[in-house]
Amino acid sequence: MSKFVDRPRYTCSLGGALATLRAIPRAVPIIHASAGCGHNLHNAINSGAGYIGGGYCGGLSLPSSNVAERDIVFGGEDRLREQIQSTLEIMDGDVFFVLTGCMVEMIGDDLEAVTSDFSDCGKTLIAVHTPSFRGNSYTGYELVMEALIQKYITKQDVKDPKAVNILGIVPAQDVFWEGNLRELKRLLQKLGLTVNTFFGEGETLKDIGNAGKAALNIVVSDIHGVQAAEAFEEFHAIPFITTGFPIGTAATEVFLRAVSEALGIDDSLTGVVIKEEKAIYYDYLERLADLYNDIDMQRYAVVVGDSSYVPAITRFLSDELGWLPELAVITDFLDDKQKNILSRRFENFESGLKPSVRFDTDASSVRKYIAEIWPRNRNDRYYDSFSPTVVLGSVFERDLAVEFGFPLLTVSYPVTNRVVLDRAYAGVKGALSIVEDLFSILVAGR
Amino acid sequence: MDYLNAKSAPAREDRLKTNIAYGGTCEQLRGCVEKGCFGESGCLNLAGRRFSQTQGCQFTLSLAILNTLRNAVIVMHSPIGCGACSTGNIGVNKTFKQLRDPRAEGVIWLSTNLDEADVINGGERKLRETVLYADLEFRPETIIVANGCVPALIGDDIDNILADLQTQTAAVIVPIHCEGFKSKVMATAYDAVYHGILKKYVKKPERREYVTEPDLEMLKKQYRISRNVNVLNVSSMSRADELELQRLLTAIGLNVTFIPCYAEPEDFQYSLETSLNVSICGTHDDYFVGHLKEKYDIPFLIDTIPIGRKNTDRWILKIAGYFGLEKEARQLIAYENELLDRSLEPFRSRLSGKRAFLAGGEVRIIATAEILQDLGITVAGFKAHHFDEFITPIFESLEDIDDVPIHVATNQPFEQTNLLKRLKPDVIITHTGGNNIAAKHGLPILPLFGPAYNYLGYSGVFEVARRLNRIMSNPQFNKKLAENKPLPFREDWYGKDPFTYIKKQDVV
């Protein structure tokens, strides 16, 4: 049974679906919903995802049936039929997705029946049920991926043993999705693999259509993309592994070794790649040997965000940066089984630290947890305070950061105080970016 | 006007016969008004489209005002996605609130997160939990409960639930019924919000009462009230706009209070101690001032918006007329005009002869066109979000616009793109949103409004001229973008009439 959410860090299924389609070139959404759904969600996603913008045909250019009271009373199917027909006449796209909002789902418009009327239109038309009352943005990603898997991706009996797909990076919810996909692709290509990321630099609809030839699906999240991977397994007989989201050289090593093992890639090749990557990373990091130790750049940290980022960042801060992440707050909708899986990600830190892990969707909860994990100053003359501390979270943590006087780096949705283009936080290059961004905040006044 | 006994405000397509789909020239539009095409049985009443693009709803637009109210927490009674657009306001809204009160909090909202089980069983339990949590956690003065489409369709008895909760909360609970599917006219949002404000915020302030009031006290009070005006601000205005309007009205001897945006709950109480409610935009305020007249007998003025010199002159004179201050007003107007006129000269020599397209709220675009004509810029075309009676007085400030195309559409960039390809203006002045498309014409774009910039009053004329000149002096960003990124419409669309997809008698 779900509860209310204090300042949600996600939109609805429809929002997640729109953000996912925003990332697919020449895919045109047709929203069958009230007039405000598309506009509202665009305003959320644009600002929350570091100003991702409407792109080719998003934002206010999203085709939408804009159903109103009379359609809700008499049914919206005629209006949808008219809208699909006119969209095909006006919009220049290669694949069209009909998405639904709450109202038409509640009155039971027959989406499949209407879309099947257009089977001869010469364009691919895919219907996806995405009412807001089912899940959240992450659900929308899974639903669009499942639809692609079932209705768009060609079945291929012969697999390419060197081809893999990456799942689990949800566009816009992962504000750095495009950079992250590029970095993961780069790392996997070094293992000699052909990598399909579905979205991002250079990806095309043709690549998506060919995803069925992959020998392995790599889900870089314990939670998100798993449903899509299961659908892949069912429809295309492609096995999958879940690796967690890799940030830093240690996590990248675990990631590359897991992929190598699943594909039977020669261990020595993987070893060489890891060695190369570490050499690059530490060559850069060595620059900070002076600064870090000259002025004591170790910090306590509070990490707030989704189930992909929080475990990854917390471990990276602890085991590579030598910081003290005391509190980790994961803000997704999760069931107990998923919480158990995620809790294990915080075990056996090399540093020996044991951060306090909380699962909570409410923005106002984070400051209460700080009070719980750290003893208060009861007017002691000597008080071991929770300071100096850095917060890594969303822009919702800004008030808290100001209140406690902690610097804030926004890494999780919503990120409205930064512009994000091709920046990555995943992998090895991504870890360098995080270090760069964190330390830049600390030296900004110098 | 009295709709306050109803649960919610009526849709504008019913109350004002507002139109959202039309294409023609300004002269044709005026002809249509005279013939009654927009009226009850008129051919353009309830016009719609065969193809439409997302356009916003009264929920999202209601938030534009609600998010500005101070000491309030907003409960969105809806599934998780509704109102997510507030994400874009968290930073700027706090800053703007703090311009009025440095201690003001940012925007705080909670979603009742209605899921499939709630759709079947009703959302009452979650609504109760959320409101009680908001009261205990944030201790706000008011809890605003805005409901989306889903509770309206499943039939949650929101008003009764909230009336019951009111006995358990310290905060005043304000219901706002703004479900998106009720109206195709986004501006119904203003009525929805004012409906809630009128019911819960507006009441006589608690003042010290005398057993027998001394004459002097009474005279002092009467004098004070006789000089007070409320100016109804809008969330698209800036603090700089307010200061400019305040400067002008103070100069003729009036005291100004701004409501509703960025106001505190008690500001609405003191706002009743006034002599005149002044709207700056009929689209926003007619429902509110109409009810204040009905209920508290406070006169109101809805005329023009003080954007552009002639409109500002007219606005000041109309207000002065209520107070017998015409002489002072004329002096001020003469002085301000002389000063402003001189300052515009350098911009006139640079901008004169250019052609501009304006898109956005009906009142705002027509008024802004006056600034353009003042600078010697030709109006190439208009696109209004909607059309109703409030547009008429503002047309009077413009010259030679009979043949200028006017397009009525809430957003709908596909029609605008087609039109722009034909009109080929030099600059676009447009409402926020949809610029991923507009930018790809490769033209400079000036935002039609901006809550951080000055547009209103005499200083606004200068500021618009200054910014327009700046923006037009280097359009390379959009030019390069347009060279490299295509528009999403099929080529044959541009061969069709831009208004091909408008149909008559659409949905209520």
Image (tube, coloured by chain):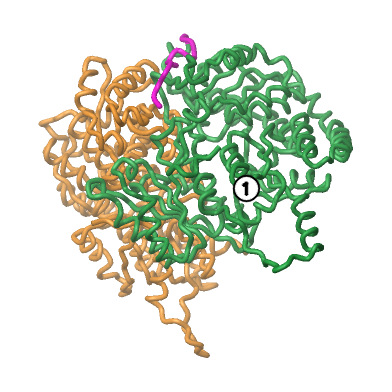
Chain colours: A orange, B green
Which stretch is magenta? B495-508
Question: Looking at the image, can residue A46 be seen?
Answer: yes
Left or right: B403, with B92 as reference point? right
Q: Is residue B15 magenta?
A: no
- Is residue A346 rendered to the left or right of residue A313? left
The residue sitting at 62% across, 28% down in the picture is: B390
Query: Dividing the image into 4 quarters, which one contains the N terminus of chain A?
Result: bottom left
- Residue position for label 1: B296
Q: Chain of mark 1?
A: B
Q: Amino acid at mark 1?
A: Tyr
Residue A58 is left or right of residue A255, and the answer is right
Question: Could you tell me which secondary element the residue under label 1 belongs to?
Answer: helix
Residue A185 pos. (x, y %): 31, 43
Dominant SS in magenta: loop
Residue A173, position as x, y percentages in the image: 37, 47
Residue A88 locus on image (x, y percent): 34, 18
- Residue A344, position as x, y percentages in the image: 23, 65
Q: Is residue A410 visible?
A: no
Q: Is residue B151 above or below residue A71?
A: below
Q: Name the image quarter holding residue B461.
A: top right
Toward the viewer: A318 or A374?
A374
Residue B306 found in image quarter:
top right
Which residue of the protein is positioned furthest toward the bottom in this rendering? Answer: A381
User: Around disc 1, counting alpha carbons within 10 Å, would you say few (fewer than 14), some (14 to 19), or many (20 or more)?
Assistant: few
Residue at 20% over, 53% down: A258
For image coordinates 68% across by 45% down, the residue present is B231
Please, is residue A262 above or below residue B71 in the view? above
Q: Nearer the viewer, residue A202 or A13?
A: A13
